[in-house]
Amino acid sequence: MLYWPFVRHKHAYATANLDSNNPMERNKRPVFVVGCHRSGTNLLYDTLLSAGGFAVYRGLLPVYKILVPRFGTFREPRNRQRMLDTWLCSKGFRRSGLDSANLTQKVLSECKNGGDFMRIVMEEIARNQHVPRWAIYDPDNVLHIHRIKRDIPEALFVHIIRDGRDIAVSLKKMGEFRPFPWSRKPRGIQETAVYWKWMVRTGQRHGSQIPQDYIEIRYEELVSDPRRTLAELGEFLDHKLDYDLIQSTGLGRLRESNSSFREDERQKDNPVNRWKEKLSTEEVAELEGLLGSCLEELGYGLATAPNQRKQGLRQQWIRIAYPIFLSTKLWLKVNTPVGRFANLSVLELAEAVDSDEVLLNKH
């Protein structure tokens, strides 16, 4: 089932569309796909693009994570110019296929905040592709739902959630995820688990403030029962998500067997419940000791009995201290000059833009 924080009925969105703050028709409103890293955000985004009607953009727009903290408020013309000079050298711009002169004119004259920048870029891409709608995929936007909604009142949010134990397995396979500066040794399953919980809970907290424009779906249900899941998601978005068309179009991750839908049970590489094979009994007990109540609230059953779940001093310290650390770190980045040190490496900047690098619609 999809987790929808308000009562559903056939015309549940009529009221939302009458909201004076959101006059845009629901079937044209922008969509933000959010969720913790490795939760299936990329798969869900490619699913929406494969359905048609959305602008196809394979670039990155880390507005609230990097651009606003690094350059400051876009209300200041100097900050807009510095931000734009940087972004025009990014891989995200090269993949947009946009004209730099036209984009510069629009941004310098119309952009007053991060949402304006997203809207200008994505509306231009959608206009060039002759489609009525656009969507953005960025896992970290789950931390900025309230900021995006403030700047783009018509935005809709799809929060995809995956079992935190599988997140730990996925990130461990990548060589351990270390969001904490003191995690120098090759470990991090427990830290990663708490990071997952913090991201999920942050997204849910922000989403609860905008119940008509926020929905949660489970990764496991998207891959195991895609027809029903997409039908319900399509109702929320007021967008036709035809499963057969999506499969035949197959953009991005839909072409990869390890991320595909699970209707064909003959496929061996099942992405669901990998933790049961990959984690030791001790690791499962440690994770469930940290995440047990959260997993159960989200509908995930536990494999260990209460007396098996480890809650030593270290686990208790991780459970209490890490969320405080993460929230403080985010607050400092967004609200203080600390944000000026935001790392630009993810933008993949180039000194000059080669026209051959325009990769629009290359999947």
Image: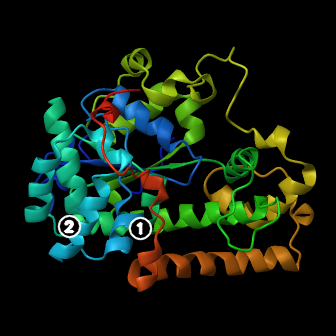
Give the class, few, some or many, for how many residues have Cα within 10 Å of label 1's Cα (few <14, many ≥20).
some
Instruction: Single out the mark in the foreground, 2 or 1.
Output: 2
Local SS, label 2? helix
Q: Pinpoint residue 230: horizontal percent, then vertical percent.
A: 42, 32
Sequence-wise, the earlier of marks 2 and 1 is 2
Q: Amino acid at mark 1?
A: His
The structure residue drawn at horizontal position 92% and vertical position 56%, both measured from the top left corner, is 282
Residue 150 visible within the image: yes
Residue at the extreme front = 351
Residue 75 visible within the image: no
* Mark sitting on residue 81: 2
Horizontal placement of 102 versus 162: left or right? left
Q: Quadrant of residue 22?
A: bottom left
The structure residue drawn at horizontal position 19% and vertical position 38%, both measured from the top left corner, is 126
Q: Pinpoint residue 17: horizontal percent, then vertical percent.
A: 16, 52
Q: Which residue is mark 1?
A: 206
Horizontal placement of 131 versus 192: left or right? left
Residues 319 and 80: in front is 80
How many numbered tags mark residues here? 2
Horizontal placement of 110 versus 229: left or right? left
Q: Quadrant of residue 353?
A: top left
Is 197 placed above or below 221 here?
below
- Distance from disc 2 to disc 1, alpha carbons, whole Å, reads 31 Å
Q: Would you say the residues marked 2 and 1 are in contact, meaning their CB atoms lie under 8 Å apart? A: no
Give the class, few, some or many, for how many residues have Cα within 10 Å of label 2's Cα (few <14, many ≥20).
some
Q: Pinpoint residue 335: horizontal percent, then vertical percent.
A: 39, 83
The structure residue drawn at horizontal position 24% and vertical position 73%, both measured from the top left corner, is 79
The structure residue drawn at horizontal position 82% and vertical position 73%, both measured from the top left corner, is 315
Is 176 placed above or below 197 here?
above
Q: Amino acid at mark 2?
A: Gln
Q: Pinpoint residue 76: horizontal percent, then vertical percent.
A: 18, 77
Local SS, label 1? helix
